[in-house]
Amino acid sequence: MERALLEVGAEASVIWRVAEADLVSAIAVGLPDAFPAVFATARMIALMEVAAARVLRPLLAAGELSVGVTVDVAHSAATPLGATVQTRARFVRQEGKVYVFEVWAEDEGGEIGRGLHKRAIVATERPLNGAARRCPEK
């Protein structure tokens, strides 16, 4: 199947209000884990991934989705509970079957994170089958 080309510079975004579950303090598993009540790096990266996946959406055929391959992101500023975060992804190039995105995030005070994220398009069942092989009793 010949896949359409993605235009360099294609962008998508996610706008998100920071809730309790988005705070790094919500990640603490127990004592002595103690983290501040600010927007979690993991959540920022997840929203960056969603933005990049949205850029790829027009290329997906039935039975396909995109999956994250690598993330190289710096989280440069803290964001409080209740703030609005916007993550953006801009397609910069293709490396074989991998799509490379510049990703960044901002809150009302300015930029809070930036980096590169790579995604690939796969058949929907591929990651599910791989997970089932790793943990067959689940």
Image (tube, rainbow, N blue to C red):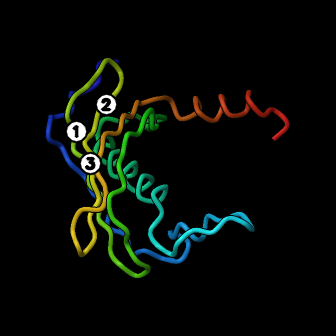
User: What residue appears at the point 74 percent right and 27 percent down from the top-left corner?
Assistant: 133
Measured from the top left, where is residue 30 in percent x and y? 74, 67
Residue at the right extreme, as displayed: 137
User: What residue appears at the point 40 percent right and 82 percent down from the top-left corner?
Assistant: 82
Q: Secondary structure at mark 3?
A: strand
Task: Say which label, 1 or 2, has the lower sequence index.
Answer: 1
Q: Secondary structure at mark 1?
A: strand
Q: Point out the image quarter for the N terminus.
A: top left
Is 12 situated left or right of 67 in this image? Answer: left
Give me the C-alpha separation between circle 3 and circle 1.
7 Å
Measured from the top left, where is residue 132 in percent x and y? 73, 33
Measured from the top left, where is residue 101 in percent x and y? 27, 39
Residue position for label 3: 89
CB of mark 3 within 8 Å of CB of mark 2?
A: no
Residue position for label 2: 99
CB of mark 3 within 8 Å of CB of mark 1?
A: yes
CB of mark 1 within 8 Å of CB of mark 2?
A: yes
User: What residue appears at the point 51 percent right and 70 percent down from the top-left corner?
Assistant: 23
Q: Secondary structure at mark 2?
A: strand
Toward the viewer: 17 or 39?
39
Give me the C-alpha separation between circle 1 and circle 2.
7 Å
How packed mark 1 is, by other alpha carbons closer than 10 Å (few <14, some 14-19, many 20 or more), is many
Residue position for label 1: 91
